[in-house]
Image (cartoon, rainbow, N blue to C red):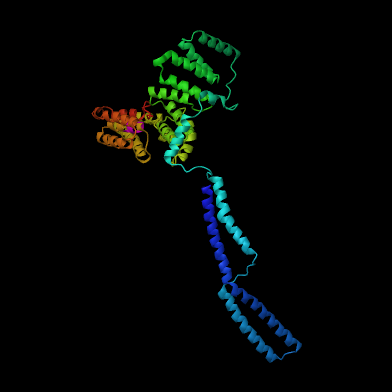
Amino acid sequence: MLVWIIPAAMSLAVAALIAAAVIRARKAAGGGEDAVQDMGLYRKQLDEVDRDLARGTIRAEEADRLRAEIARRLIATDSRVARAGVVDEPARLRPVLVVALLALLIALPLALYARIGAPGYGDLSLRDRLDAARERRETRPDQATAEASIPAGLVPPADIPPAEFEVLIAKLRDAVAARPGDLEGATLLARNEAALGNFTAAYEAQELVLAIKGSDATAADYLAYGDMMILAAGGYVSPQAENALRAALARDPENSAARYYMGLMMRQNDRPDVAFRLWDELLRAGPEDAPWIPPIRAQIDEAAHLAGIEYDQPSAADTLAGPSADDIANAADLNETDRQEMIRGMVSRLSDRLATQGGSPAEWARLIRAYGVLGDPARAHAIADEAMQVFAATPEALAQIADAAQSLPAQATTATQPANGAESQLNSPSESPPE
């Protein structure tokens, strides 16, 4: 209640001060109001003098003397009115003025706060907010609860398959149930159940795939498992789906799809700052036609706003897709000197963007290797030192930068076809930022 009481009391105090000033001004002008009444009286006396002269009750000399005396008094009274600064304002307007002040200084701010503010929201420190987000994440609904609470129609039904396909799927289900150790059958069942939109049955079949493979299960296997659970829950990342994603990242820390889903989980649990950091790195790493890029572009602006970050999405030309097919075709027609200058221009543009806008560890590592291949080890080492400072708090990023820096001596002494090597570094699809 203090959030409401204190501003209301302050506004009321300001309104009271202004109203008191208005009242004092009216009292100070009291003599001026009397002077206004006198002026009306003197004007009536002038009219009476004219009527008496017309009736012949006074002589013309007496009328002139009376007019002069009344005019003198009228001028003196007019001077008193001017000094008092009196305005011809009806007294009934004064309560209206006070009410308007109260509405302007009290009702309007409170109504504005009720609309765009957060009434009842406690004043939380950053640590309290982080603790609340952690508690929300640890106590969020599990997979079964999430699936049970999905509104009808949230998960769109798949196209109705042909009758022959339904027969085959039914046979496949029976075969997998009869032979639970059949890896190929479980894999086919998981894939086809997902294609039919039966995501719950799909991840149950994929769970069987993981059990059969055991320690040989790959990051793709765990990613498929988590993806099916997320789809079954209507886009919600449950604790079970998170465990699957973490298992995928443990086997492939640079798995972009798993990292996108981890960002989505953080966004759903009041950590837009973490979601933004993950999505921004993925967006800059590209490629633009990757399936996770469109959903990132649709959500990253809101995540940046909630995280308090002023952000402009990088264009498709700014991602790490590398030289275009036209660039490579044009470079093939150039002589060695012009070709190397063209590649140096590409490297220079990447360097300028990292210096002004920042980027992911993969981009920095790629730039370091590119300058090493171009025969500029001093510049490459300087960029490596700068990257070490930028990612000092991220051990995974430091490891990636260190790997790129360790490759510099061998690349710096390689004098054959430097432009080709730099181009391959810029266009390498295998590098993506770590978690």
Q: Is residue 60 left or right of residue 212?
A: right
For the question of whether residue 314 can be seen, the reply is no
State which quarter of the image contains the C terminus: top left
Front-most of residues 423 and 173 = 173
Residue 304: x, y in percent?
45, 38
For the question of whether residue 76 can be seen, the reply is yes
Front-most of residues 102 and 336 = 102
Residue 247 counted in the magenta span: no
Residue 298: x, y in percent?
49, 34
Residue 364 counted in the magenta span: yes
Is the residue 191 above or below the residue 133 in the image? Answer: above
What segment is highlighted magenta in the picture? 362-367
Q: Which residue is at 60% across, 70% downward?
A: 87
Front-most of residues 223 and 124 = 124
Q: Which residue is at 70% across, 90% downward?
A: 60
Q: Which SS does the magenta portion mostly show?
A: helix
Residue 277: x, y in percent?
41, 35
Is the residue 84 above or below the residue 374 in the image? Answer: below
Q: How many marks?
A: 0
Q: Where on the picture, by quarter, is residue 255?
A: top left
Is the residue 208 above or below the residue 72 in the image? Answer: above
Residue 11: x, y in percent?
53, 55
